[in-house]
Image: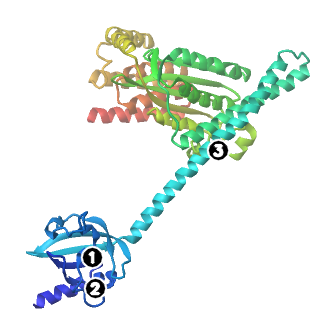
Amino acid sequence: MKTDAINMEIADYALEMIIACRDDGSIIYANKKARMELGYGEDAKGHNVYSVFPAFLDESGSPKKMRDLATGEPKDIIAYRVNKTLFHCRAVVFESDPDIYVILGLNVSEEEFLRREISNAGEEVQEADKVKTEFVANVTHELRTPVNGILGSTRDLLSVVTDSEQVKKLTLIEKSCENMNNIISSILDFSKLSAGKFTLEQREFNFRDMIDYVKESHSSRINEKGLDFFVSISPEVPDVIIGDELRIVQILNNLLSNATKFTSVGKIALEIFKTARVGKKVELFFIVVDSGIGIEKADLSKLFKSFSQVDASISRNFGGTGLGLNITKQLVEMMGGVIECESEKNKGSTFSFSIWVEVPSEEEDEEEEFEDEGGELELIAEAAEVIPEGSEEEEGIKAFGNDENISEIEKRLSKLILCVEMQNWERAEMFADSVKQLVDNAPKDIRTTTLHLKMDVQKENYDKVVEDYGQLLKYLSNYKEG
């Protein structure tokens, strides 16, 4: 008896309702929390759990058996007080003794209120996003219509006007309209991406023809500035792929336009490699290098944020909305890739990104045949050209990871760093090419670092080359130990 009294006293200090009842639902005990929540005063006897919890009744209003309700599983139900007000309750029923059932209940009204508030807030945000997206779509359409009208009329005038001063002014109007259209397109793309309504259109196209188009689109502007422009596609990149051609072009246009905008002297280079393959999917790796104004390391984190430029003076001097790289990043990620930037103030920038695309069945078959029948001989020939003084057999060095392969990579890296120390950058680039061939099947970290090594050699960046060299040796050492 004394133990029962102690248990009841402990129950009175519980933070949840504790109700004991018989099989017919009659309450034989309710702790202090239950009496307070339900308005029973000091004594709950004479009350019935079926009047408290309507969920304990079946569809006809008849009481369910307590034995059937005692599942031990928590359920969210409604509880009624004596004064007929109600609250949300999380309750669990279990059998304590034969014909004695215990109900543990917790008032979750506040939790339910917060859940509804969060749900309503989410709906309000969705509605606001919908309104914003529709507004942006309507406004951009309304803006584009007069801009295109002005652009069309300007081009008509340019075709007939001969006065040089008038041609100059009309050309300025034409360029301004084109810039405005680009800004409108960026705002519309950003709005769609933010609202999750942007979709990629996958179709088959010729990749090299696309790159030729991109090159031709930028060559004129780059040549006007007196810059060198290099485009290189690795032989293993498929001719035909399946992907969103328009959006890949958009990514490259954004990066090359920025490179052109921020580079006054030197060069711009675009290199493309195939870095991985899984079934019909291949990973393409793009590198865009410029010798422009560069970026402070502290500002790199701002690059891919919306409406952000690393310096307010850049917006004043070069223009732009600060949306291009944010859109580029989102498009790259939609294609299963990542984008990164390496840069030094006044020393240029290197943007690299990867995307995954599909290879058509016939292209896949041709690629496999090329790799199986000609790949090894081509590698040996290229290696012999790069290191003519090394007449040893090159059989077996292609398969990354074996002792001969690792040894050959380390040997060529040593010769590369020696060329760098002697300022023979052209020779160093040849060794970088040969190393790239030997890591073709290596883990991604090694392939990526090798690509960076080659680009840094091309830029004649001594410090970065030494850093890449050390990182590669570390990777190779870990690989041998593993």
Residue on which the image places disc 2: 32
N-term-proximal mark, 1 vs 2? 2
Q: Quadrant location of the N terminus?
A: bottom left
| Residue 238, quarter of picture | top left
Task: Give the number of the disc on residue 77.
Answer: none
Residue on which the image places disc 3: 135
> Would residue 299 appear left or right of 24 to someone viewing this image?
right
| Residue 444, quarter of picture | top left
Residue 474 seen in this snapshot: yes
> Would residue 43 appear left or right of 176 to someone viewing this image?
left
Q: Is residue 108 above or below residue 39?
A: above
Q: Quadrant location of the C terminus?
A: top left
Q: What element carries label 1?
A: helix
In depth, the one of 184 and 285 nearer the eye is 184
Task: Give the number of the disc on residue 51.
Answer: 1
> Would residue 480 appear left or right of 328 to someone viewing this image?
left
Q: What element carries label 3?
A: helix
How far apart marks 1 and 2 lie (CA) works out to: 19 Å
